[in-house]
Each structure stands twice: as structure tokens, then as C-alpha cells.
């Protein structure tokens, strides 16, 4: 007799609980947001390396603003999730996994829309706090890129 782990059994994989689906969706959403922020940061660094400091600063500012909005959306989504857990489950037919998944998706979209329209001000506060640091970093990168370009020009002469 051989005992297989629970994760290897295909019928258990198909009957995913709402909590597992919610955790999986949340993790995928966070990973996508993180990859987008990394991509925007790389784009801003590439613009700084090309010597276009104004474009680099604009891209860095846009990436920072989007990251702050994304953080606020994640915070609001977590807040909704925790608030929903305080509500007593009941009703005539009880709770199904499909309903829980739908409510989680609805809450997630509602949190994104709230963050896009200003939310609770958390994204703005983060942006105001982080913008000076990002501006200084972008200026330093632009100066470094300009110095490198100047050295390359002098070496090619």
C-alpha cells in the first residue's frame, strides 16, 4: 500500500477552497503589480542612462505614483477582506465557494477603483513622502549618465 500526499491527488486540486483561491489570486495580483513596478523602474533607469533626464524623471514619477496607488488598492482590499470576515455567515442557503470568490473579486475591483479615484489618501501620503527621495535618485542617475556620456565623448576624440 502506497500513501500519496494530499497535494498529489487530482480531485483535491479541483475542489479548491475559497480561501486557497483567494490567496492564490492575491499572490498573483501582487506578483503582477510588483513586476509592473520593476518594469517601470527599469524603463526610467534606461531613460536616465540615455541622457534624457526630463523623460527619466517623468517616468520615475509616474512609476512611483502607480506603485503608491497599487499599494493603497492592496491595503483597501485587505481591509475589505478582514471586514468581511467579521460578518456572520448565514442566510437561507449558506455560503458557497463561488459566492466567496465572487465577493473577493468584487472587493478587489472596488478597492482598485477606490484607489484610482483618490481612496482614503494613503497613496497620496506615500507619494508625498517618497517623491523627494525618488527625485534625488533620478537626478543623481541623470548626472551619472551625463558624466559617463561626457567621458565617452572625450575618449572618442
Image (cartoon, rainbow, N blue to C red):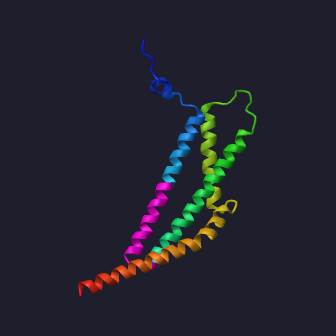
Query: Chief secondary structure of the magenta span?
Result: helix
> Is 15 on the left or on the right of 90, as rendered?
left
Residue 53: % across, % down:
44, 79
Quadrant of the frame with the C terminus: bottom left
Q: Residue at x 55, y 63 (%)?
A: 66
Quadrant of the frame with the N terminus: top left
Q: Is residue 52 visible?
A: no
> Is 58 on the left or on the right of 119, as rendered?
left
Q: Residue at x 63, y 70 (%)?
A: 128
- In the image, the segment drawn in magenta is 34-53
Task: Based on the picture, tell me whether residue 41 belongs to the magenta stretch.
Answer: yes
From this view, report whether residue 10 is shown above or below residue 28: above
Q: Which quadrant of the figure has residue 113? A: bottom right
Residue 70: % across, % down:
57, 57
From this view, report whether residue 120 is shown above or below residue 147: above
Q: Residue at x 53, y 27 (%)?
A: 15
Amino acid at each position: 500500500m502506497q500513501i500519496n500526499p494530499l497535494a498529489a491527488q487530482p480531485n483535491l486540486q479541483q475542489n479548491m477552497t475559497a480561501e486557497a483561491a483567494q490567496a492564490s489570486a492575491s499572490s498573483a495580483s501582487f506578483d503582477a503589480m510588483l513586476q509592473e513596478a520593476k518594469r517601470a523602474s527599469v524603463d526610467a533607469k534606461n531613460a536616465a542612462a540615455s541622457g534624457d533626464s526630463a523623460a527619466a524623471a517623468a517616468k520615475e514619477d509616474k512609476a512611483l505614483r502607480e506603485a503608491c496607488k497599487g499599494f493603497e488598492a492592496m491595503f483597501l482590499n485587505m481591509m475589505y477582506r478582514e471586514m468581511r470576515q467579521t460578518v456572520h455567515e448565514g442566510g437561507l442557503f449558506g455560503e458557497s465557494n463561488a459566492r466567496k470568490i465572487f465577493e473577493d473579486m468584487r472587493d478587489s475591483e472596488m478597492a482598485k477603483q477606490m484607489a484610482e479615484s483618490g481612496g482614503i489618501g494613503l497613496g497620496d501620503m506615500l507619494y508625498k513622502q517618497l517623491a523627494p527621495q525618488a527625485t534625488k535618485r533620478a537626478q543623481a542617475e541623470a548626472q551619472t549618465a551625463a558624466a559617463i556620456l561626457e567621458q565617452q565623448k572625450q575618449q572618442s576624440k
